[in-house]
Amino acid sequence: MYAAIADELRKLRPVSEFTRVSSVWQGRIRLAPMPLPPELGSEVTLRNTPIGLVSAVTEQGIEVALLSSAPPELVPGARVILRPARRALGGSHWIGRIVDPDGAPLDGRPILRLSEQAENTDVSTAMACRGLGARLTTGVLAIDTLLPLALGQRLGLFAGSGIGKSTLLAEMAKTREADVVVYALIGERGRDLRTFVTEALDADARARSIVIAATSDRPPHLRVGCLEVAVRTAELLRDQGKQVLLLVDSITRFAEAEQEIRAVSGGVTGGYGLPAGFPARLARLCERIGPGAGEAGDITAVLSVLVSGGDMDEPVADLLRGLLDGHVVLSREIAERGRFPAIDVTRSVSRSLPDAATAAEADLIAKARRLISAYDEAQLLVRSGLYVAGGDPVLDAAVARHDRIEEALSRSGMDSVEASFAVLRSALGG
């Protein structure tokens, strides 16, 4: 027993380290070299007050970009605290817990031990991994029918603020077909974390979930690390043969944290107006998510993106849409008329189709999309009273069935895919 405890203690790395200021100049300071070099963006504090972020690590020392003007006590020889990033990694013992990217508990329960894994996770080759698996039942009718999510699929969730993105993710987290749900909350408000855990998730979902959170008040290196820790934890669980559902909220905040780090380090801007190297880094992370190989399980992922004004062509949204296996768009207009989840079916695509649907299901999906599209195109005529029945059989059916289709698309908590299709079939008129 004592030998096991001693072995665990030898694995521990410091949460924070003391060092000294070696020089100070306008807007920057240099710290003495350290045995464990910090990551760019790591936070530096003086008397418990954040004063700057690590912008470069050289042979001469650690350069820090100050967040504001230097306080009077910040002089050569002053002692500061630096938080080096730790490679936290959870496992099955993290299930049911809420932690930060350092592995520190946020739920008031005992400290967790960290699992071990190689620093560099190799991406399985495309030929070694399986294809997408069977349809995953989320309980959300619109997704289980019109926009199926298959095991191992990576789906983007694109939405503006305040139109039900987090609520939809919580509904999906309740699926019983995932052994573990890994939820990464990046750069969101602290109250969003509390609301998600205490209100949106039920007791059963909480018991099967790992929540890794770096809220908006945390330094940028922790917000960037939140996604990395979540992906590595999901990989470890997948390699143990588990079916993992990875929910990320949001990729936009991850990109903003990267921009903060690159800004203080004098980094250049690359394509899409994003930090140089960011698209490649995000692509590598996405490639590590997906179906497993051999006896491993799968990582099924839903990655959310904040889009301002519904602009699907903004840099992060455009980049991610090309990396993933489909996208679900939430519409503010639909939310404002009271239908939740506010999924805009005509602007959403799942690349698991047509393989994920039977011939009969594919016919229902095509019919539903045809009627929804016809109504959307003519809704101005309908609402203004200019629509006259009898001119277009498809539009006549769309108008007649609109209310029932809307009611069906608002359904969640469905027991099975078959039950969802039965409701959709009824709404379409058999």
Image (cartoon, grey):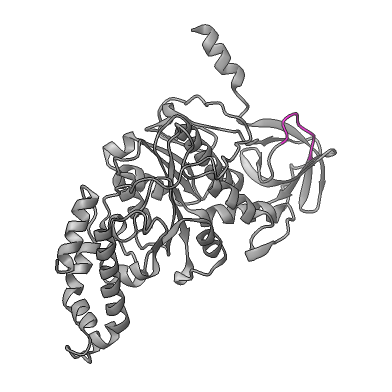
The magenta stretch spans which residues? Answer: 31-37
* Residue 192 screen position, x and y as percent: 39, 50
Front residue of this view, candidates 234 and 6: 234
Q: Is residue 64 left or right of residue 312?
A: right
Front residue of this view, candidates 67 and 423: 423
Q: Is residue 416 left or right of residue 69?
A: left
Magenta stretch: helix, strand or loop mostly? loop
Front residue of this view, candidates 157 and 421: 421
* Residue 371 in view: yes
> With respect to residue 12, does 72 lie above or below?
below
In the rendered image, residue 32 lying in the magenta stretch gets the answer: yes
> With respect to residue 242, does 365 lie above or below?
below
* Residue 68 in view: no
> With respect to residue 373, does 62 lie above or below?
above
Q: Is residue 70 left or right of residue 9?
A: right
Asked where in the image residue 110 lies, by quadrant, the reply is: top left
